Image: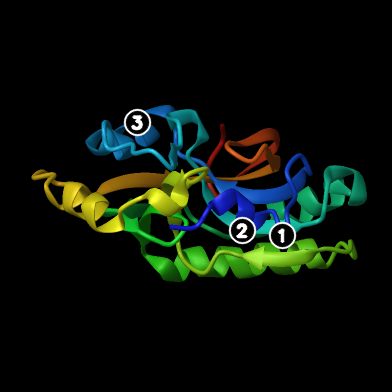
Amino acid sequence: MENFFERVGRFWPAGRRDLHWHILPTTDEAAALAAPYKGLAAPGLQGVPVHGMHCTLLHAVGLSSNDVDTDALLKDATSYAQTVRPFTLTFDRPAVGTVGVEISGWPGRQFTEIVETLTQVTVSTGAVFKAAPSRYPHMSLAYAANGAEDVDAVTLRAALAAIEQPLSGPLLVDRLHLVEQWHDGAHITWNPIAQVPLAGVTT
């Protein structure tokens, strides 16, 4: 496997705070999604803690909260969000990729519509950044980190295949999260900026 943090460091260096739009699971949702995979951590893999699980919609590469009118951004995002009804994403058995282990979800159509619109809304602020929109719903359970080259992906896939229980789980999408996010070469962290509720959501 390849070190995730070294790969993203080519365009998102450690310590730089970039704006991200996320869908975030509740603590209970994240714990339920991660529970079947406890104990599968291996040298070279950096597990994602429950409180760090996230489903990225858009990474605004090179754009911090100081570089954009966040009030205007949130006003436009809120107007759009009020046209979208809450829906459920279902996440299934994880895949072992080149830079980590992730669970992917469905349906993709509603997710993609949100990604495309948030990208347009962020671009319309006139701020200078590179848009890195997500192509499908996914959340990482672990990132390949130091020692990634020693991870045996076949052994890891076998361990995942040996889990004999239902592995899919739901995530209710009823709000969008704007955060300022950074990494230190081993962990991803963010500061919340705002929650944008979808139509009919009052809290």
- Give, as a three-letter code, the residue at label 1: Arg
| Circle number at residue 7 | 2
Q: Position of residue 182 (x, y in %)?
A: 70, 41
Q: Position of residue 140 (x, y in %)?
A: 44, 48
Residue placed at 42% from the left, 68% from the top? Answer: 108
Image quarter of the C terminus: top right
Residue 28 appears left or right of 187: left
| Circle number at residue 180 | none
Label 3 SS: helix
Q: Pointer 3: what residue?
A: 31
Label 1 SS: loop
- Give, as a three-letter code, the residue at label 3: Ala
Residue 197 appears left or right of 64: left
Q: CA distance from mark 2 to mark 1?
A: 6 Å
Please identify, in this view, whether the residue under mark 1 or under mark 3 is nearer the observer. Answer: 1
Disc with the residue nearer the chain's start (1 vs 3): 1
Asked whether the beta carbons under mark 2 and mark 1 sit within 8 Å of each other, the answer is yes
Q: Pointer 1: what residue?
A: 10
Q: Residues within 10 Å of mark 2 (few under 14, many from 20)?
A: few
Q: Is residue 77 above or below residue 177?
A: below
Q: Residues within 10 Å of mark 1 (few under 14, many from 20)?
A: few
Report the front residue among 189 and 199: 189
Q: Position of residue 148 (x, y in %)?
A: 45, 49
Q: CA distance from mark 3 to mark 2?
A: 28 Å
Q: Is residue 161 above or below residue 109?
A: above
Label 2 SS: helix
- Give, as a three-letter code, the residue at label 2: Arg
Determine which quarter of the picture holds residue 66.
top right
Determine which quarter of the picture holds residue 35.
top left
